[in-house]
């Protein structure tokens, strides 16, 4: 995915939801968080987002421009309308989030370590590849990542998640 495609999805989401402010989570948030994200981090063809003020409108977005929609079939990428609970991040992540403006649309993007925390919690193969890529390109500080994981809700297996994150850094050249 590229920045123009991200902007296209956001414009479509704004038109569908009649909202102008969105939170973008998931791997393609790197298009906002990093000026020149490495290509290996941009393989996903979906953007996880929700309207910042009315997350319940995510279903409208998902139905209209989500997976298998005519939008997806036409353009080859799509939105995943998610909710605030989708990406598990430290409770103070919004204090570090950045704002991005695309015309009338405001986009809230988590700081890269907070975004990586959510990937560590999800712990799928694609999340492992993503976190490993961030670490390999020195876009993450492993100590900061481990600290941020330690700040998430203790209902999650924090020590296991921290160990999972450490394993992603093994074998990477310093």
Image (cartoon, rainbow, N blue to C red):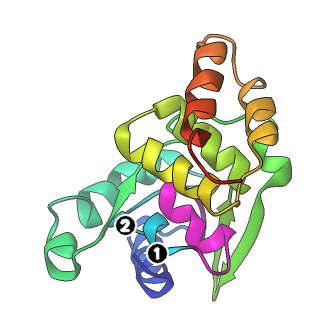
Asked if marks 1 and 2 touch (Cβ < 8 Å), the reply is yes
Q: Residue at x 63, y 89 (%)?
A: 103
Q: Residue at x 56, y 31 (%)?
A: 167
Instruction: Say which of 168 and 106 sits in front.
Output: 168
Q: Quadrant of the N terminus?
A: bottom left
Instruction: Say which of 35 and 15 sits in front.
Output: 35
- Residue 77, given in percent of the width and then of the height, sits at 28, 72
Q: Read off the magenta span.
A: 22-37
Q: Name the side, left or right, on which 95 lies relative to 76.
A: right
Q: Quadrant of residue 142?
A: top right
User: How many neighbours does mark 2 have within 10 angstroms: few (below 14), some (14-19), or many (20 or more)?
Assistant: some
**Residue 33 magenta-highlighted:** yes
Q: Residue at x 39, y 77 (%)?
A: 12
Residue marked by disc 1: 39
Q: CA distance from mark 1 to mark 2?
A: 7 Å
- Residue 78, given in percent of the width and then of the height, sits at 30, 67
As drawn, the label of residue 43 is 2
């Amino acid at each position: 995915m590229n920045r123009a495609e991200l902007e296209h999805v956001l414009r479509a989401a704004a038109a569908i939801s009649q909202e102008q402010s969105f939170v973008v989570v998931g791997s393609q948030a790197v298009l906002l968080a990093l000026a020149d994200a490495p290509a290996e981090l941009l393989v996903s063809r979906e953007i996880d987002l929700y309207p910042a003020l009315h997350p319940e409108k995510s279903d409208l977005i998902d139905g209209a421009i989500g997976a298998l929609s005519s939008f997806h079939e036409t353009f080859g990428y799509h939105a995943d309308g998610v909710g605030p609970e989708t990406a598990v991040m430290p409770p103070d992540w919004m204090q570090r989030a950045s704002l991005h403006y695309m015309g009338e649309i405001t986009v809230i993007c988590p700081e890269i370590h907070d975004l990586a925390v959510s990937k560590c919690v999800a712990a799928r193969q694609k999340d492992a590849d993503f976190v490993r890529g961030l670490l390999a390109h020195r876009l993450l500080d492993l100590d900061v990542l481990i600290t941020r994981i330690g700040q998430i809700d203790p209902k999650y297996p924090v020590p296991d998640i921290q160990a999972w994150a450490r394993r992603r850094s093994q074998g990477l050249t310093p």
